[in-house]
Image (cartoon, rainbow, N blue to C red):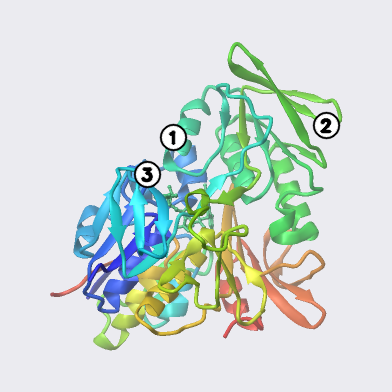
Amino acid sequence: MNGVLVIGASVGGLTVVEALRRKGYGGHIRLVGDEPHLPYDRPPLSKEILTGRWPIERALLRDREQLDDLDVELDLGRRAEQLDLEARTVCLDDGRHLRYDSLVIATGLAPRPLPFQPAVAGIHTLRTVDDALALRRELPTARRVVGIGAGVLGCEIAAAARSLGRQVTLIDPLSVPMARQIGGELGARIAAMHQRRGVHLRMGAGVCGFNSVNGRIGAVELADGEVVPTDLAVIAVGSVPATDWLTSSGLTLSDGIACDAYCRAAPDVYAVGDVARWRHPVTGVSTRLENRTNATEQAITVAANILRADRPYTPTPYFWTDQYDTKIQVHGVIAPDSRIRLIEGDAAAGRFVALAESGDTVTAAIGWNHPRGVRTARRRLVMDP
Amino acid sequence: MEIIVDQDKCTAGGLCVMAAPEVFDQRDEDGIVVLLDANPPAGHHEAVREAVMICPAAAIRLKEDR
Ligand SMILES: Cc1cc2nc3c(=O)[nH]c(=O)nc-3n(C[C@H](O)[C@H](O)[C@H](O)COP(=O)(O)OP(=O)(O)OC[C@H]3O[C@@H](n4cnc5c(N)ncnc54)[C@H](O)[C@@H]3O)c2cc1C
């Protein structure tokens, strides 16, 4: 019995371990992660950790005692370097070859760098707690901050920096912030919110270069020739699946690890969380989700499937974002051409529930400072089983 | 089983309410978790454990009798 080997010790990987134990699995479980820290949660990094409201211990997913109760062998600060499907082994950076009966890959994402990004001080990305601490150290003394990329993460970073009193410019080639996640109409609301708070928005603008002075960033150059002076730049232009270590494994990699409806990438090999692409059996669409709840729900399904439940993974996606004092929650998927229809609350007051509709189909329920309302509205989604 | 919730960590997703509506609720104004029953009967334990795992803020803790 070689047991279950889990690579990636964050929320996806850890939840597989918890779910296996909860279902009574008594075999050996090993959890390997390349970060030196106990498993922690990422959503607070761009929120409470960045503003300094929380010490980092508050972002830990479970404490020592809870981890001990799981009876899991934790290998932290160790990177998986290679997978041999034939021999059923994973090779670590310390030279060990670990055998498995079942393998779970939960290695998440790495920030996408800009190709012309120079190696100078003052340029940041945000994925890990170390990234968050590095950024938090510099924020108080940076007078001006530029956010490159106005997706959910870029917007949260802009909000945190603005809350700390920095001058903030947020730049994105699309016409409104968070356009990909919530579409044009609600994106315009996000834009208005940031402008009200004093963020300088440069939408429809591409960054084409950085100017540095004495080894430190001094300005960001835009494609239209404008030069935006800054003391700090945070790049949040998306992330790429952390599958570099799997290139020669024989697994199918195409923007994530390709899996079947059961999240299986190969016999007894599963993928979970941000790194996993699977065929959603209800929508029929090849899907990869990057949100917190997907990581846990997929992990629970994979744990069941390791124990031969043969359960297809059919989630209703859910994500939230906190910016300033606004909480936005989305159940389902907002298509670019969705109509947004208010069903409760008051849009002008900034507290409402809306539905996203394509034709006659409700594809998403959106809550804007209305958590209870949006949970109830979720029932109107066709996707929800 | 004893349940402890951390309202400061809670992100108001309401996923616990969907998992175990007899045990968890949300405040009207901001959706923060409200514990209806800190010592639920055995019939709810599975649903509560599910809620603990699914909580996207890791804001629910259990003390289980062993
Ligand atoms: C700053 C930030 C804020 C966020 N906020 C929200 C939010 O408000 N709402 C929301 O719904 N979602 C949010 N998310 C998304 C959410 O955190 C992710 O969806 C979730 O972390 C995915 O979990 P995961 O376990 O799949 O991957 P990850 O959390 O990325 O974990 C993967 C782990 O594997 C490790 N690893 C990678 N390669 C190897 C290797 N070869 N060997 C060993 N270990 C390896 C990584 O270092 C990492 O520790 C946020 C993400 C970030 C970064």
Chain to which the residue tagged by mark 3 belongs: A
Is A346 displayed left or right of B36 in the figure?
right
CA–CA distance between discs 3 and 2? 37 Å
Of tags 3 and 1, the one toward the viewer is 3
Q: Amino acid at mark 1?
A: Leu
Q: Amino acid at mark 3?
A: Glu
Residue drawn where x is 36% and y is 41% of the image: A55
Is B55 displayed left or right of A239 in the figure?
left
Q: Amino acid at mark 2?
A: Ala
Residue drawn where x is 75% and y is 67% of the image: A335
The residue that mark 2 highlights is A223
Numbered mark located on residue A133 in the image = 1
In terms of sequence position, does the residue under pointer 3 or pointer 1 come before the other? 3
Secondary element type, mark 1: helix
Can residue A349 be seen here? The reply is no
The residue that mark 3 highlights is A35
Can residue A40 be seen here? The reply is yes
In terms of sequence position, does the residue under pointer 2 or pointer 1 come before the other? 1
Residue nearer the viewer, A282 or B45:
A282
CA–CA distance between discs 3 and 1? 14 Å
Chain to which the residue tagged by mark 2 belongs: A
